[in-house]
Image: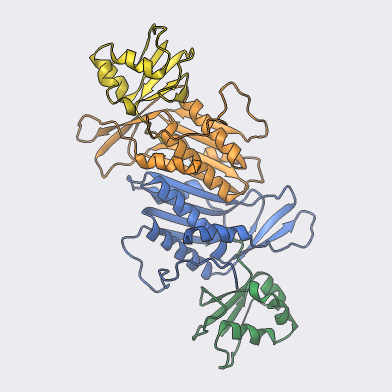
Chain colours: A yellow, B green, C blue, D orange
Amino acid sequence: MQIRYFAWVRERVGREAETLEVPAAVTTVSGLIDWLAERDESYASAFAERDTIRVALDHEHVEHDAPLAGAREAAFFPPMTGG
Amino acid sequence: MQIRYFAWVRERVGREAETLEVPAAVTTVSGLIDWLAERDESYASAFAERDTIRVALDHEHVEHDAPLAGAREAAFFPPMTGG
Amino acid sequence: MTGQAPLSPQTTPKPDQERDPALPPVVVRIQAEDFDPAAEIEKLVAGKANIGAVVTFTGLCRDEAGRLAALELEHYPGMAEEEIGRIAQEACRRWPLDGILAIHRHGRIAPGGNIVLVVAASRHRRAAFEAAEFLMDYLKTRAPFWKKEHLKSGGAGEWVDARESDNADADRWTR
Amino acid sequence: MTGQAPLSPQTTPKPDQERDPALPPVVVRIQAEDFDPAAEIEKLVAGKANIGAVVTFTGLCRDEAGRLAALELEHYPGMAEEEIGRIAQEACRRWPLDGILAIHRHGRIAPGGNIVLVVAASRHRRAAFEAAEFLMDYLKTRAPFWKKEHLKSGGAGEWVDARESDNADADRWTR
C-alpha cells in the first residue's frame, strides 16, 4: 500500500511517502494508524494527536472508522489550511 | 421648490424638472403629491399608482408622511432597478 | 408606500457629517464610460499588504435570450453618488474593511456590457463577502437608477419592473 | 475525529462518474505560477451574453503586521484538483451557474501575492455570491493544502493552525 504524509505529519514521520506491506489483519483506517504508530518513535510522535489527524483513501476524505477496502493509497495529514 | 421626475414618472408628467411655488398649506410629501396630481391629467396619470411612487427630499429617501420642512428639492420616481 | 428597505436610519450619516477617520477609503463613481475591474482592484489594494480577501461583483447586461438590443440606464445625478456612498459607509461600520468601491454606469449599455462593479477588501473572507453582498443588495433597492429595455425587434422599450425578491434580499440585513 | 465539514456525501460524484452535460463548465487548476484574475474572468464569460452576475474572490498572502517573509503552501497533488473539482460540481448542482472556476497556488508566496482565485458566474446575483462563498468555505476546510509561515526574523516557520471558525463557515451550508 502506498502511504503518504503531509505537513507536520510528514515532518514528524521524516518521509513524504513509502510503500508498505500492510498485514491482512489491518482492515480499517484506525487499525492502520495503530499499526503505523507502533513502527518507531517518529511514527508514534506523528500520530500522537490522533484525533487531529485527517485521512484520505485514494484521494477522498474518510473518517477513522472507514474500511481500507482495497485502497491503493492512504494519506495522513493535519487539518487543511489552504485558501 | 425644485421638483424632479425620473423614469416613467418623468415620461407621464412630460418633463424632467420644474420650479414651482408650493402653497404654504402643503407641508408633507403626501400633501405635495395631492397638490401636483390636481394640476392636470399628465400629473394625475403620473401619480395614479400612488403607493408605488418613491420620493426623495434633498437627495435622501423619505416616506410619504415626511414633512417638507424647508427642503429645496423633491424628486418623484418608481422603485429603483439599478445594479 | 411599501417595500422600501430601511438602512438603519439612526446610523446613516447626513451628507454634511465628517467621515470617521478610522474608516477605510470609500470610492463611489457614477459614469457613462466602461470600467476596468482589474485596474480598479489594483488601485484599491495597492500598498496594503495586510488585505487577505478581495470580493468583486460585476453586474452585466444580459441579452434576455437574444431579445434585448440594449438597456438604457437613467439615474438621479448627485443623489446616486450620495446614496451609494451612504450604503458603503454603513458597510464600513458593519465590517472590518480595508477598502470598498462601487462604480455604476448610466446611459445605453449593450448585452454583455458592464453595468456595476463592487469591490470589498478585508483581512477576512467573510467580511469581504458580506460587505460586497450587502452593498449590492442595498444598491439594487436604494440607488436611484432605472432601467429601460430597448428590444431587437425595435418595439417600444419597457421600464424594467422592480423585483420583490430584491427587497427581500435587502431586508435580510435588518434581521 | 471532529470538525470535518460534511459535503453531502450522498451526492458527491465519484471521480469516474460522468459529468452531467447540463452542468456548466468547471475549471480547476493547481499551479505554482501567479494568475491573472481579469484574464480568467474574461475566458469564463466569453461568448455567454446571458450572464448577469460575476462574483470573484481573491485570497492574498497577508504580511501579518510585517512579521511574515512568506507563506509556503504544501499540497497533495492529484487529490487537491479532485477535491476542489468535487466541491465545484456540488456548487453547480446547488445553484444555476453559467461557469465556475478555482485556481489555487502552491509553493512560496510573498505578502501581497495571490493564493487563490474563485469565480462564479450566473444569471442571478444571489446564486453567484452564494456559490463563490460556498466554494471558498469548503475549499478552506477540505482542499488538501497546508500553510507554513516563514518569518522575517528568520525564526523557524510554524505550520498555520486550522481555525474553528472555518469549520463553522462550512457547516452553514449543511443547515
Residue under the image location 59 percent in, 93 percent down: B23
Position of the N terminus of chain C by quadrant: bottom right
Horizontal and vertical percent position of residue A25: 40, 8
Horizontal and vertical percent position of residue C22: 31, 60
Horizontal and vertical percent position of residue A24: 42, 7
Residue situated in front as seen by the camera: A55 or C19:
A55
Residue situated in front as seen by the camera: D48 or A62:
A62
Q: Is residue D113 left or right of residue D120?
A: left
Q: Quadrant of residue D10?
A: top right
Q: Is residue C152 above or below residue D119?
A: below
Q: Is residue C31 at all visible to an observer of this figure?
A: no
Q: Is residue D23 above or below residue D15?
A: below
Q: Is residue D53 at all visible to an observer of this figure?
A: yes
Q: Is residue D56 above or below residue B59?
A: above
Numbered disc total: 0
Residue situated in front as seen by the camera: A28 or D70:
A28
Horizontal and vertical percent position of residue C65: 73, 47
Q: Residue furthest bottom?
A: B24
Q: Is residue C49 above or below residue A63?
A: below
